[in-house]
Amino acid sequence: MKPFPIGVANSISANFQFDPIDTIDFARQGDFEIIQVYLNDALLGNQEVLKQLLKAQENFQQVYFHAEGMLNRAFFESDYYRKLCRFLEQVAEPKYIIHFDEHAHIDEMIDLVEKLNKGGRQIYVENYFQRRGKEDAEKNIKKFQALFTLTNSLGHTIYPVLDIPRLFHRDLEFSQAESLEWCYKLLNFFGNRRIPILLHLIDASDDGHDRLSFAALGEGYIPYDDIFGFIAKTAPLIAGVIFEFEDKINPLQSRKFIGAKMKKM
């Protein structure tokens, strides 16, 4: 299996008010290939930082921008979205991530994808859960899959972000075996369609995902040995891995874990 790029989100700079410049410096020094920056409204108003973000693209294979909001009409009609578009117009290969909204009607999301998918921008939709409980979680995942099936059948290309830890969060009320099965199903769903998947990863000592419980991949409760074994066996297209820890030690240790797994692929 071809090696995939590994990177960090600016969440790793939590102790520095999530400063993306601090993240860039760490990622460059640590030889990470990609980074992800959460573009909140305040950051979009900071022209000096935006200039540095544009320049940073020279140092990485890809810079992903995480939008503030969800895939719904409120996002599309917001002043924030207009600011985001103005910034992305300056990016050579603009890629931005937005959370899936389980409350939005599927027809509305398909219509929005058509409108958002312009100007050379690549949209990445991340699995996201707002309701609690197993029944609603299963409906959410099936609706998430339907969005990709229907948009792609209509010729509108969007890309998935698979946040694996979210599938193992206690709010979904899945057993670990059920969470793992849904993880496999989603990897197969996109893998069979040869759609590149961007992975968001952390590990933790418990299923509440509190910052203080964060652990390097392979040291927490999420069964990453099984997950990467499945990835090695089924070979889905992995666009890259983004670590969303809120510290700088766990990403380094987690990269070693993935490196060891990739040698076996």
Image: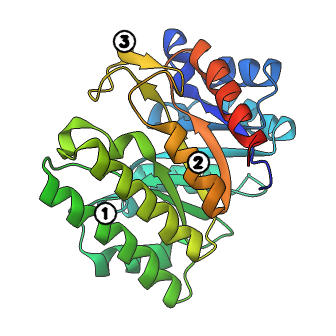
For badge 2, the amino acid type reads Gly
Q: How far apart are marks 2 and 1 (CA)?
A: 22 Å
Q: Is residue 245 left or right of residue 64?
A: left
Q: Is mark 2 on a helix, strand or loop?
A: helix
Query: Which numbered disc, 3 or 1, marks the residue that appears first in the sequence?
Result: 1
Residue for point 54% across, 15% down: 247
Q: Is mark 3 on a helix, strand or loop?
A: helix
- Measured as percent of width and height from the top left, residue 236 is found at 63, 63
Q: Do the residues labelled 2 and 3 touch (CB within 8 Å)?
A: no
Q: Is mark 1 on a helix, strand or loop?
A: helix
For badge 1, the amino acid type reads Ile
- Measured as percent of width and height from the top left, residue 165 is found at 40, 39
Query: Which numbered disc, 2 or 3, marks the residue that appears first in the sequence?
Result: 3
- List the residue tagged with mark 2: 229
Residue for point 63% across, 42% down: 241
- Measured as percent of width and height from the top left, residue 97 is found at 52, 52
Q: Nearer the viewer, residue 66 or 242?
A: 242
Q: Is residue 59 above or below residue 21?
A: below
Q: In this view, does 33 lie to the left or right of 229?
A: right
Q: How far apart are marks 3 and 1 (CA)?
A: 28 Å
- List the residue tagged with mark 3: 212
Q: Nearer the viewer, residue 206 or 120?
A: 206
Label disc, if present, on residue 141 of the rendered structure: 1
Q: Is residue 102 above or below residue 44?
A: below
Q: Are marks 3 and 1 in contact (CB under 8 Å)?
A: no
Query: Which numbered disc, 2 or 1, marks the residue that appears first in the sequence?
Result: 1
Is residue 7 something one can see in this rendering?
yes
For badge 3, the amino acid type reads Leu
Q: How crowded is mark 2: few (under 14 residues within 10 Å), some or many (20 or more)?
A: some
Q: Is residue 236 left or right of residue 56?
A: left
